[in-house]
Amino acid sequence: MTLSEQTEPNTHDQTAKCPVDHHTLSTRHIPFVNMHPYSPVTQDEKGVWHVRDYAAVKQILRDHTTLQAGFSSELLKEMPDNKLLSRLPVLFQDGDAHTEQRGQIVRFFTPKTTRTNYQRIMKQYAHEMLAELYEKGSAELSELSMKMAAGVAAQVVGLTNSLRPDMERRLDQFIRNNSLEQSHISRNRIKMWLAEAGNQKRMLQFLLIDVKPAIAARKKRPQQDVISHLIANDYTDTEILVECLTYGTAGMVTTREFIVFATWHLLENGTLREKYLGGNDTERHQILEEILRVDPIVSHLYRRATEDIVITDTITIPAGALIDLHIDAANIDKAVFGENADSPCPMRELPRGVLPPAMSFGDGAHRCPGAYLAIQESDMFLRELLAIPTLKLKSKPTLHYRNSIAGYEVRDFIISVGD
Ligand code: HEM
C-alpha cells in the first residue's frame, strides 16, 4: 500500500469506468528512472531523502518549515560575503521575503493581465511560427516553440529592448552551457557560480545586449513588467540579470519543452487529438494539463528540511535533510490517478482536490505563477498546429536530461506540413 492510499483513497477505477480504450493512448515519454514503486520514501547512501508518493510530495511542498534547495539555489544562499546579490531571485527566496515578493509579482500573471497584455503577442507569435513552418515545409519544433515561449515571457519580464535579434538563442546558449550540478553536490562561491554557470562571455552578452537596454528604457519610462518592478525596488543590475536568467529557465525553457511533449502525444494519440481539437477552452486546457502530468517538464524539485517532517508513524525526515521530490513518480501514483496513470486520457477523473497537472507546476509557496500563461500560450499555438491535417513527425526524437530544469528536453523533433 502506498502512502497516498493511506491518506487519500482513490475511488476512481479508470479501467472500469472510463469510456476511452486505454490501449489506444500514448504513454509517458520520459524514462522511468529510479521509480521504486514499492518504496515511496527512501534515503540513499549520501543521506538524501527521495519522496515519490503523491500525498507526501504535496505535504512537503506545502510545509512552511522547508527551504528551497533546487536549481543550485543553495550555492547562492550559503555565501556569507555575497556582495553582488543581496536579494535572490524569487525562485530562490524563502519565508517572508518570498511571500512579499510573490505578492508583488502576482499581478503580472493574472488571467486579466494575460488577456489584456499578452493575448495579442501570443497570437502574433503563434501565427509567425506557423508561417515559418509553412514556408520551410519542415522545422525542428523546439526552435519554433522556444521563439514563442521566449517572446511571450520577454513581455512579462520586460526584455523588449534588445540591441540585436535572437535573444532566445543567447539565453538558451547560456543556459545550455551551464554545467552546474544540483546545489547539494557543488559548494562554490558566487564567482564560481557565475563562471561555471558560465561561460561568462555569454552572460555578459546577454547583460549588455538584452538586459541593460531594457533597464535603461524602464528607468526613463517604467512599464507594467517585472524589470520595472525590480527597478522600483532598487534591485541592482546584477540582481536584475539573475532574475532574468531565472525567468529564462523557469518560463522559457519549460514552456518550450512542454509544447514539444504535447505535440508528441497529440500526434501519437488520435483519440486525444480529436478531443483536443473539438473541445472548448476548458476541455482543451485540461487535456494539455493531463499531458503535462504524464510528462512533467520539471521532474524533480528539491527542499531542505529545517525541522523534522513526520510522513507516517514510521517515517520521519529529520531536520537538515535534503529532500528530492520525484514529481515524475508522484504524478503517476496509481493510488491517486488510477490504472494507466502514465497515459494521458481525455476523460480521466481525478479525486477531489487533485489538479489536472498534478504537481507539474509545483505546489505550495513556490507553485508556478506562470501556469495559466503557459497553458494559454501553448494552447494558442497547438490548436493551430494540430489542426494541420498533413502535420507529420519526420524523425525519431531524442531525450536528454537537463540539470537547469531538473527534467528532460526533446530534440530531433522535426515536423513537416507536406503531403
Ligand atoms: C509548461 C511550462 C512551465 C512549467 C512546467 C513550469 C514549472 C514550474 C515549477 C515546477 C515551479 C516550482 C519550482 C519549485 O517549487 O521549486 C515553477 C516556478 C516558477 N515559474 Fe514556472 N513553469 C512553466 C512556465 C512558466 C512561465 C511561462 C513563467 C513566466 C513567464 C514561469 C515563471 C516561474 C517563476 C517566476 C517561478 C518561481 C516562483 C516562486 O518561486 O515563487 N513559469 N515553475
Image (cartoon, grey):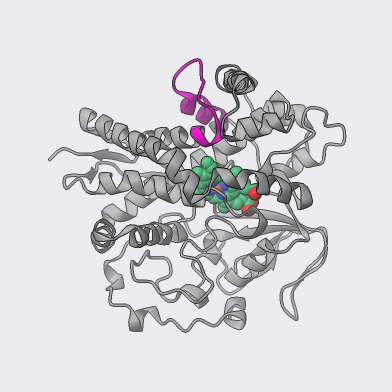
Residue 128 in view here: yes
Instruction: Answer with the quarter of the image where residue 115 lies.
Output: top left
Q: Nearer the viewer, residue 164 or 175?
A: 164
291 is within the stretch colored magenta: no
- Image position, residue 292 (x, y; %): 44, 56
Residue drawn 41% across and 76% down? 339
Is 297 left or right of 317, judged from the image as shown?
Answer: left
Count of number-bearing discs: 0
Given the current orientation, which residue lies at the most extreme right position? 80
Q: Quadrant of the N terminus?
A: bottom right
Expressed as whole percent of the image width and height from the top left, the position of residue 383 reads: 29, 49
Left or right, 319 with reference to 118? right
In this rendering, the answer to whether 389 lies above or below 20 is above
Vertical placement of residue 345 versus 4, above or below? above
Q: Position of residue 194 (x, y in %)?
A: 70, 28
Residue 142 visible in the snapshot? no
Query: Is 117 or 406 nearer to us in this picture?
Result: 117
- Which residues lie in the magenta part? 155-174
Q: Which quadrant of the figure contains the C terminus?
A: top left
Left or right of 118? Residue 3 is right
Q: Residue at x 57, y 22 (%)?
A: 214
Question: Considering depth in this image, is 198 or 234 the residue closer to the camera?
Answer: 234
Residue 156 magenta: yes
Residue 197: image x %, image y %? 65, 31
Residue lying farthest left? 419
